[in-house]
Image: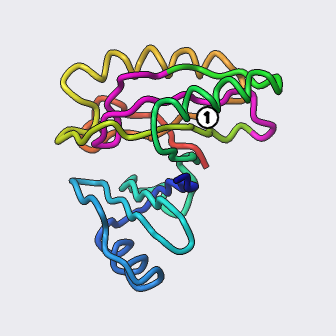
Amino acid sequence: MSRVQLALNVDNLDESIAFYSKLFGAEPAKLRPGYANFAIAEPPLKLILMENPGHGGSLNHLGVEVADTDTVDAEQTRLAAAGLASVDERDSTCCYAKQDKFWVTGTPDGERWEIYTVTGDSQTFWGQDGRQSWEAAEATLDASPEAPQCCGSAPGHAEAEAGASAPG
């Protein structure tokens, strides 16, 4: 099963959860500080809400959630054959989930797309040492001039990332 992921920055998580619960007739599948995700069956959508005050209503990133790591690998191979570059981020922890994924680089308008599968749950946004691996992946992604920041600031990391902007 594949579904499109839409990650939105929101100013107020509680207000946004109330709105999207009514809009899609569903409650969040995962709720953590500053973060909620909805697994909408119809239309097939993974809706991610990331509390990012001052950036509400803007796009954080896009993605395609796939069934397993084999599908991640197959998609990366397919896109490489089509001439699209990617940055691997395997065995990572981000957004309260353990994931195998890659990021597509060189999009025409600078939006970030990830192709990913969730391999497990995490009680932390970045994981115990995930901050180190994310910084390496982000540095590689940022080497592409058209690539905006992804995931903005992790909840609780606002002071450490003062001045960082989320994509819009």
Residue 112 colored magenta? no
The vertical placement of 127 against 64, above or below, is above
109 or 64: nearer the viewer? 64
Residue at 57% x, 26% y: name it. 73
Location of residue 142 by image quarter: top right
Question: Which residue lies at the image location 37% right of the left edge and 17% below the top edge?
Answer: 133
Query: As displayed, is residue 168 above or below residue 39?
Result: above
Residue span colored magenta: 89-109
**Which residue type does callout 1 highlight?**
Pro
Q: Position of residue 52 (x, y in %)?
A: 39, 52
Viewer-side residue, 82 vs 111: 82
Colour setup of the view? rainbow
Position of 150 with respect to 135 (left or right) is right
Q: Is residue 121 above or below residue 91?
A: below
Answer with left or right where residue 31 lies relative to residue 67.
left
Which of the two residues, 65 or 14, is positioned nearer the viewer here? 65
* Residue at (38% x, 39% y) in the render: 153
The kind of secondary structure element at disc 1 is: loop
Image coordinates of residue 15 in percent, x first then y, are 34, 75
Location of residue 14 in the rendering, given as x and y in whole percent from the top left corner: 29, 71
Binning the other alpha carbons within 10 Å of mark 1 as few (below 14), some (14 to 19) or many (20 upward) gives many
Q: Quadrant of residue 13?
A: bottom left
Choose top left, top right, bottom left or bottom right for residue 128.
top left
In this rendering, position of residue 83 left or right of residue 91:
right
Q: Nearer the viewer, residue 55 or 154?
A: 154
Q: Residue at x 30, y 22 (%)?
A: 131
Is residue 105 highlighted in magenta?
yes
State the predominant SS element of the stretch in magenta.
Answer: strand
Query: In this figure, which residue is indicated by the disc labeled 1?
Result: 148
Identify whether 14 is placed above or below 67. Answer: below
Number of on-image labels: 1
